[in-house]
Image (cartoon, grey):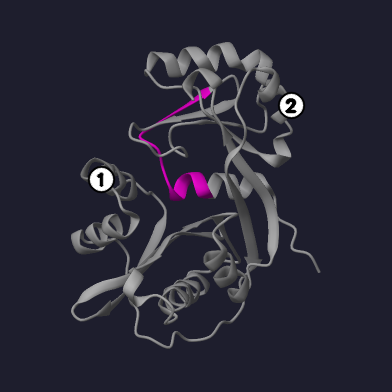
Amino acid sequence: MTLQIDPWRIEEACRRAWPAVSETMVAGWLARSSGGQFRRINSATPGPEALPLESALPELTGHFSALERPAILRIPDFAGIDEAAIEASYGPPEAETDTLAMALRPCAVPATPVELRPRPDSEWLATRAILAGETPQAAALTSRLVGSIADRTAFAAIRREGRIVSLAFAVLHRGLVIFESVRTEENWRGRGFARDCMLALLGWSRDQGAELAALQVVRGNAPAQHLYADLGFSTLVYRYHYRFPRSAE
């Protein structure tokens, strides 16, 4: 039976799992701003009661202009506003992303010992920055954002040769757990470490009373898509993408 889950519930949990520095409702759109180059936290997403794009766009453009940022749109496919974005001279879709979900169930035990902590330490954050290829400025912003997560969290890490080589984290919000930053050092890939981090976090999630799990993954990331399918993330709830105003391209 296909899993039925409200996409707005996932949107809310994902927003809390990767918080922005500033969030403002503009004509029913969630306008997020943080500086840096992260699109997710520097864009506008329509909410359940959002005004049509043609009505909201002047306010959105004014809001982001005051921040000296382009009015980037993050568009879930269920919002049905792509035609309006094209008519408003927005560019083609970018970074198309799948939102996958599954009902939590008993899972395998990790084959490799996994460290779990309720909050990340400086080593975990520094390693994540290296694995993500972040600049010092982006790494500082990520540390700030991760440190501002208000919900229960667990941070997983696998060590080899005295250092962290694989990591991930999970955020639990109202029975729904979201997974973020699943990364493994290139020289240690292919050994199941990302899977083991996920298994440890799935076990933690069940212990915390979570009922559902979800994550978001870029459509072109075949290794990650394969890993998540193998773990049981078989329900595609929705997709989203970004559109940039052509003046910002």
Q: Quadrant of the N terminus?
A: bottom right
Crowding at mark 2 (Cα within 10 Å: few <14, some 14-19, many 20+): few
Q: Is residue 142 visible?
A: yes
Instruction: Look at label 2 and name its amino acid.
Output: Glu
Instruction: Look at label 1 and name its amino acid.
Output: Thr
Q: Is residue 156 visible?
A: no
Identify the secondary structure beneath mark 2. Answer: helix
Say left or right for 84 vs 195: right
Q: What residue is drawn where x is 68% and y is 24%?
A: 86
Q: For marks 2 and 1, give the CA distance.
A: 36 Å
Tell me the residue that label 2 is attached to.
83
Q: Disc number at residue 135?
A: 1
Which contiguous range is marked in magenta? 14-25
Say left or right for 181 vs 15: left
Identify the secondary structure beneath mark 1. Answer: loop
Q: Disc number at residue 23?
A: none
